[in-house]
Amino acid sequence: MIDWTAADIARRVAARDVSAREVAQAHLDRVAAVDDRLGAFLRVDGDGALAQAGAVDAAIARGEDPGPLAGVPVGLKDVLVTAGVETTAASKILAGWVPPYDGTAVARLRAAGAVVLGKLNCDEFAMGSSTERSAFRPCRNPWNLDRVPGGSSGGSAAAVAARLCAASLGTDTGGSIRQPAALCGVVGLKPTYGRVSRYGVVAYASSLDQVGPLARTVEDAALVLEAIAGFDPRDATSIDAPVPRYRDATAAGAGGVEGLRFGVPDEYLAGDGLDPEVAAAVAAAVDRLAAAGARVERISLPHTRYALSAYYLIATAEASSNLARYDGVRYGLRVAAPGASLADMYCATRGAGFGPEVKRRIMLGTYVLRAGYYDQYYRKAQQVRALVKRDFDAAFSRVDVVVCPTSPTPAFALGEKTADPLQMYLADVFTLGCNLAGLPGISVPCGLSSGGLPIGLQMIAPPLAEPTLLRAAAGYERIAPFTARPPEVAP
Amino acid sequence: MKLPREEIDAIAHLARLALTDDEADALCGELGAILAHVAALSEVDTTGVEPMTHAVPMDLRLRADEVEPSLPAELAVGAAPDRDGDYFRVPKVIDG
């Protein structure tokens, strides 16, 4: 049962071949068997999951439509607010906080019949590229437990790869869905900015954050996206446009890649940090697309080399503002000596509650936003961001989809990059341009390294062109199915 | 490049963030290195380029001016680290 796709589970549960409770129990058993080694879950809500599954079974017994995700067991990155279930963003400053409401994406998943198993590990406040920055415990890669699963949605990727849940939700600010998907050998989809509501998402960098699915097939990713996408009046940045039937774009025989125009950016294949095996796997994948009837051409995204700098200035500036709300007054941790002033309480609470990477980003963000530095850093970064977007606009006048590596390397060892923040930031070098420009992007597995670690192929499309993106990704998946299983958590 | 310790202390104060001596010392080098890296942005000619504030063009929307139910007070203050009835309690702000 743990090998069934989300689409299979929904079909079988709706047809009463299997009950949602049986499916939920099988996955809970799997979590109990392997997650102490993996560290994908921060919190398992077994009782809640079985109650939701029971409600799905009861609805089916009454002859009601159980929804397109009937009985599909899902996990949620711990930045997604869940009613009645502790939500911490993997930070000590929120330890023990039990939200009184569901975020929109979570509510829509439940309404579609999905069963929430619990909350998944991540880098603290989604700041990181390895899930080593969780304040509670690191998550490990199911392909090799000495390696990181990527980040910041590392728990979301590892849980799906290890068959702990059929699909999960992550958030992607600079690549935090696609990079861990690549490192764990699963599909990760970052939708167009504004396509999925951010209401009820613990904010990191509001102009970049986007919620999206991780799954084992492109069809499953489409199925989950269809459930969570759409206008939400509670999010002022939500796009008011109809949600297409994304599943149609991934259905067997739906178009394939024939006639699609793919652009391979020169700048993404010229970087010093690109692992030769990743370069070779991506080149082979592009050759397969061409052999299947796609048109492939070289393109240029000339401002790529500046995207990382622009990204870190914008993201940290927004983070320093967003994280000002953690002050020990309304929720979470409070640290205050008797007789301390209000300002002392703020400083002590934040000093004790935030981890090193969060402090580093708050400090950088505060530095670049302070009086006199705004034009030099933040404004300049937003101008460069406009140029990055122009590069993509120009590319999309010639091609339908940009194709490139997702991550410059396969999964790296735990501890390998934690001492050098800049090295860690480079793990997102191929993904963050897509966030700066607000575009949809997807990572699909495209092979294994000689060390047996997954490699991801990234595709990027114009705003709201998720159907094209999904068609391209599903087309590639049909040409080159990825069937390998992570060995360290087998069977 | 290394930032002076006084500058780190000043930023920490602005961010309302207590740092240990070790943390502050480490940040002198780390922030310095990151700022040296991002200085590459000055190479880019951005003359006449409007700063991008939003990834997708959007109109500012206002919701209808209608009263809707709000979170009950008990839930709103329920997670407070310190409360007094329906109020959040904080250390004294005004002397006297």
Image (cartoon, rainbow, N blue to C red):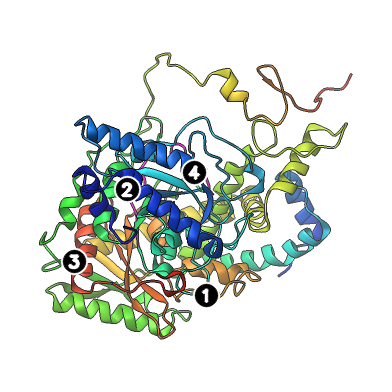
Residue range highlighted in magenta? A187-204
Residue A445 image-quadrant placement? bottom left
Please tell me which residue is depicted at 39% across the width and 59% down the height of the picture.
Answer: A160
Mark 1 nearby-residue class (10 Å; few <14, some 14–19, many ≥20): some
Q: Which residue is mark 2?
A: A72
Please tell me which residue lies in front, A287 or A212: A212
Label 2, label 1: how far apart the Cα atoms are: 31 Å
- Where disc 4 sits, the SS reads loop
Mark 3 nearby-residue class (10 Å; few <14, some 14–19, many ≥20): many
| Amino acid type, residue under disc 2 in the picture | Val
Please tell me which residue is depicted at 64% across the width and 43% down the height of the picture.
Answer: A95
Mark sitting earlier along the chain (4/1): 4
Mark sitting earlier along the chain (2/4): 4
Q: Tell me which chain the residue with mark 4 is part of.
A: A
Label 4, label 1: how far apart the Cα atoms are: 31 Å
Label 3, label 2: how far apart the Cα atoms are: 24 Å
The x and y percentages for residue A100 are 52, 30
Q: Which residue is mark 3?
A: A475
Task: Name the front one of labels 4 and 1.
Answer: 4
Mark sitting earlier along the chain (3/2): 2
| Amino acid type, residue under disc 4 in the picture | Asp
| Amino acid type, residue under disc 3 in the picture | Gly
Find residue A412 and name its label: 1
- Where disc 2 sits, the SS reads loop
3 and 2 marks in contact (CB < 8 Å): no
Mark sitting earlier along the chain (4/3): 4
Any part of residue A486 in sight: yes
